[in-house]
Image (tube, rainbow, N blue to C red):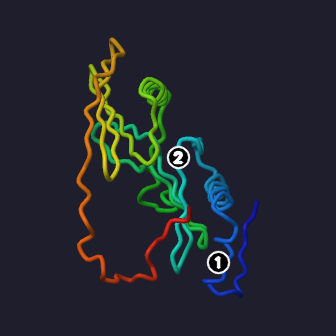
Amino acid sequence: MDYILSTSETMQEDINKLVSMGKQALIQMAWDLIMDKQLDFRIFPEDYEASVWVNSKDVQVKFRRLMRYIPESSYLEYDISVALLGKKVSPFDDWFYQNNFFVPDKEQQQTISYLKKLLGLPYSYMNHEISEDDENYYVNTNSETAFRHYIVNKKSGEPSEPLEGTYVVLPQPFPDCEFDEENQWVEIK
């Protein structure tokens, strides 16, 4: 499906037209733009949590990877962001991140699936990271306000009791100050 906005309209009219399509249509539009990239690997929408953001300059759809497998000694990109007006898909259109996008190999995907089923993951609005050593898998989940850590023994398959806690949410340092308010991103619910 091709999504073309009139170039004769103002940017704000283009943004309003996009927003009026609704959140689900924008998510589908963004996913279609990702699939148009003809990647050398497959990614699946169920591996991501999508959100739609708007400001005075663009509409963005962000795909946050629900489960992040963290290999030793490497920095990888896990999330995808699509700027709908410019049809830019990050990290695939960013030359410096193209080779750093995480795609699980077969063994990593099996580990992710196993731990998701064992621990009942993912939890909404939380980040999930998996790492491992020779004896254990380490599963860390967190959000702005809470965390939960598991250790799963590879041989027995038994998870530890989770270490859980909450964070103190600090107030904004300058709640009354306006820092480029017109360009602040607002989530479309």
> Counting residues from the N terminus, which is met first, the one under dot 1 or under dot 2?
1
For residue 53, side relative to residue 157 (left or right): right
Residue 48's disc number = 2
Q: Is residue 94 visible?
A: yes
How far apart are the two marked residues, 1 and 2, measured between alpha carbons? 26 Å
Q: Quadrant of residue 162?
A: top left
Secondary element type, mark 2:
strand
Q: Is residue 20 above or below residue 148?
A: below
Q: Quadrant of the C terminus?
A: bottom right
Q: Residue furthest top?
A: 156
Q: Is residue 7 above or below residue 100?
A: below
Could you say where residue 40 lies in the image, as x and y percent from the top left? 58, 44
The residue identified by callout 1 is 16
Number of residues whose C-alpha sits closer than 10 Å to that of mark 1, classed few (under 14), some (14–19) or many (20 or more): some
Name the residue: 30% across, 83% down. 177
Count of numbered labels shown in the rendering:
2
Could you say where residue 31 lies in the image, as x and y percent from the top left? 63, 54
Mark 1 near mark 2, Cβ–Cβ under 8 Å?
no
**Amino acid type for the residue under numbered disc 1:** Asn
Q: Is residue 173 above or below residue 141?
A: below
For residue 41, side relative to residue 175 (left or right): right
For residue 26, side relative to residue 174 (left or right): right
Name the residue: 61% across, 55% down. 34
**Amino acid type for the residue under numbered disc 2:** Tyr
Could you say where residue 147 lies in the image, as x and y percent from the top left? 30, 42
Secondary element type, mark 1:
helix
Name the residue: 34% across, 16% down. 158
